Image (spheres, rainbow, N blue to C red):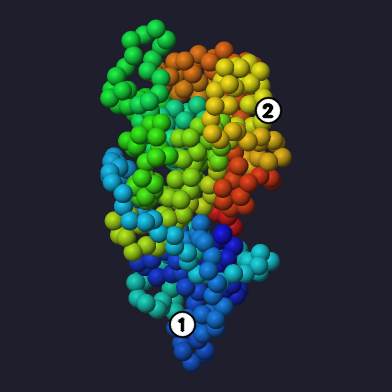
Amino acid sequence: MHARDELARVEWLRQVVVEAGVEAGDLLHVLGARGERDHRRIVLAPQLREELETVGVRETEVQDHAGGCALGERHPRGGRRGAVLHDEAGVLEIEHHELGDRGIVFDHNDARPAHRTDASVRALPDRPLSLATILAHPDDETFGVGGTLIKYTAAGVLCHSLSLTRGEAGQSGRAGAPPIAKEQLGEIRAAELAESGRRMGLISATAFTYPDGALADAPPDSVIRDIVRWLPAIRPDVVITWGPDGGYGHPDHIAAGELALRAIALAGVARHEPELGDHVHVRRCYRMVASAEVLDRLGELDPQFTAYMKTLAVKPQRWERSRLGAAIDIRAVADRKWHAMRAHVTQQQDLDRFERFRDKIDFASSEETFIRAFPDPGGPPLETDLFAALRGAATR
């Protein structure tokens, strides 16, 4: 499940040099040295095939910090495509105690199949960390995890947001105001997404055009492939998506979370479908959830919303503190989050509700809570930084 821990043992080496032409995210064969007469040329160790086991790869230690590309607008393609691949890669499985502090270094100066004996090992250059959200509607990124995004953009993390719909089935302005036509509302809400992203400091904010209110009925292969095409432009280290109960049982939220996880799995393996772009390894994934104390307090203050949740097919789970995987303190950026939330002008009814409860429920001003999708799915230990494990790996 975790490629970092399952890279096969390479005895005594702190760094492994790979030849030019290897791309970030490529699966690597573990190589063993020949005997003293073979002058340091390398071959596959003969016993590897017998010991090979199949595991799912979700992250990688291979990084190439020289590349990069700009994000272009993505338009989903209609119609059902072929079945989504469920690839798995074979790597040697080893125990945690057998791991050393090893890194992968790209030797861009040597494209020969075998390295020169004097090839130098260079330290991995620094690069900004990257975070992406894959959610259902414009405003999910701000109302749900806006504080987390602002906190990380302020720390230099490159943050991106993807909405799978344009929210055309949502609210259309202030109560009593003339309603906005559905064909116009989607365009307006996509613009609100862009503005809230600007206020939060995002690098990009993208909205697909899958149907709002019917995301669960959209052709899953089509949605997944469009996410997979989007990921190579972003190359996120960490992804945030909706939790298994969609926060409070919203079917679009639930569908977005499941589609995102399937797309991340597909994007992380080598494929025979070049049109999907380079494969991308997301190293950590978190799922946004509403804590039990927040939902309890919301139920006390807004019985109407509680009654609405009871009409939904999926009921929210009770995410007690002991079940959470991460809680991000956003108090220092709460005012900036509220400023970004107000960019979603059409969602005035929700904004008014949040304003009424702002001093009574700290769900928008205090912290944002998550469980882990991978690695170490689920809850404890409770993390306070989504990038802590990656920063620790970068300094070793």
What residue type is disc 1 on? Val
Residue lying farthest to the bottom in this orientation: 37
> Which quadrant holds residue 166?
top left
What residue type is disc 2 on? Glu
Would you name the residue on which mark 1 appears? 43
For image coordinates 66% across by 31% down, the residue present is 292
The N terminus sits in image quarter: bottom right
Tag 2: Cα neighbours inside 10 Å, few (<14), some, or many (≥20)?
Answer: some
Residue lying farthest to the top in this orientation: 176
Q: In terms of depth relative to the viewer, which is nearer, 264 or 257?
A: 257
Residue 256 in view, yes or no: yes
Inter-mark Cα distance, 1 to 2: 57 Å
For image coordinates 34% across by 37% down, the residue present is 210
Q: Position of residue 132 (x, y in %)?
A: 45, 41
**Is residue 227 positioned above or below 349 on the image?**
below
For image coordinates 31% across by 49% down, the residue present is 80
The C terminus sits in image quarter: bottom right
Tag 1: Cα neighbours inside 10 Å, few (<14), some, or many (≥20)?
Answer: few
Tag 2 secondary structure: helix
Contact, CB < 8 Å: mark 1 with mark 2?
A: no
Give residue 180's mark.
none
Give residue 293's mark.
2
Tag 1 secondary structure: strand
Q: Position of residue 295 (x, y in %)?
A: 63, 26
**Is residue 297 positioned above or below 10 on the image?**
above
**Is residue 10 positioned above or below 292 on the image?**
below
With 95 as the anchor, is 181 left or right in this view?
left
Residue 339 in view, yes or no: no
